């Protein structure tokens, strides 16, 4: 992993499954798949079979975990979710990470992430377009519960 970061250059950081593992998340293990690295848009490095290099204009401030620069927990979770198509894995990642950063942080990160690969997570977090429409309609509906009346004093 250190070789991947050195190759990717300044500002690079681990993300997805490797970063979640380094953050101490128990719902995931590092995969034998390619190491996923975030790097600045202007990086000249190229991905290889064992290195998935993702250039981004939205490079977060890295955290240092076990000597490696890693993406913040919510970003690593969203990047991992974008790579898995497993409902149980997606649920496990969201459940564990939400205990540390909260659902709002995950929703905010999802809102900024590419839509590809995030549909399931958006549905699980109640952030799907259908859910947004439902909430908007609920907000406009008048309250069906009558206001409590204050009893008048007798006498």
Image (spheres, grey):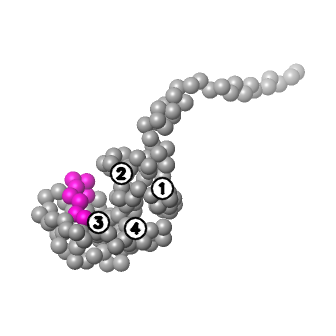
Image quarter where the N terminus lies is: bottom left
75 with respect to 92 (left or right): left
Residue 36, label in figure: 3
Using the image, determine if residue 40 lies above or below residue 129: below
Whether residue 94 is visible to the viewer of this picture, yes or no, is: no
Q: Position of residue 57 (x, y in %)?
A: 21, 53
Residue at left 35%, top 59%? 83
Q: Residues within 10 Å of mark 1 (few under 14, many from 20)?
A: few
Q: Label 1 belongs to which residue?
A: 87
Q: Position of residue 73 (x, y in %)?
A: 39, 62
Question: Circle 4 — which element?
Answer: helix
The region drawn magenta spans 52-59
Please identify the dominant SS of the magenta region: strand
Which marked residue is nearer to the observer: mark 1 or mark 4?
A: 1
Q: Position of residue 97 (x, y in %)?
A: 47, 61
Which marked residue is nearer to the observer: mark 3 or mark 2?
A: 2
12 with respect to 112 (left or right): left
Nearer-N-terminus badge (3/4): 4
Question: Circle 2 — which element?
Answer: loop
Real-space CA distance between mark 1 and mark 4, rounded to the nearest whole angstrom: 18 Å
Which marked residue is nearer to the observer: mark 4 or mark 2?
A: 2
Real-space CA distance between mark 4 and mark 2, rounded to the nearest whole angstrom: 18 Å
Residue at left 46%, top 35%? 130
Residue at left 59%, top 24%? 142
Real-space CA distance between mark 3 and mark 4, rounded to the nearest whole angstrom: 11 Å
Nearer-N-terminus badge (4/2): 4
Using the image, determine if residue 84 lies above or below residue 20: above
Q: Quadrant of residue 47?
A: bottom left
Residue 117, label in figure: 2
Nearer-N-terminus badge (1/4): 4
- Give yes or no for contact between labels 3 and 4 (Cβ–Cβ under 8 Å): no
């Amino acid at each position: 992993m250190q070789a991947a970061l050195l190759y990717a250059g300044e500002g690079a950081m681990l993300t997805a499954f490797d970063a979640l593992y380094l953050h101490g998340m128990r719902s995931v293990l590092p995969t034998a798949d390619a190491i996923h690295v975030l790097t600045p848009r202007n990086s000249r490095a190229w991905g290889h079979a064992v290195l998935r290099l993702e250039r981004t204009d939205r490079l977060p401030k890295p955290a240092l975990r076990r000597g490696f620069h890693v993406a913040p927990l919510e970003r690593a979770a969203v990047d991992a979710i974008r790579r898995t198509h497993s409902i149980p894995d997606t649920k496990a990642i969201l459940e564990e990470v939400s205990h540390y950063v909260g659902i709002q942080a995950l929703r905010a990160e999802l809102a900024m992430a590419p839509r590809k690969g995030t549909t399931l997570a958006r549905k699980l977090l109640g952030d799907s377009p259908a859910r947004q429409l439902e909430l908007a309609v609920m907000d406009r509906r008048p309250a069906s519960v009558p206001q409590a009346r204050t009893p008048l004093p007798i006498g």
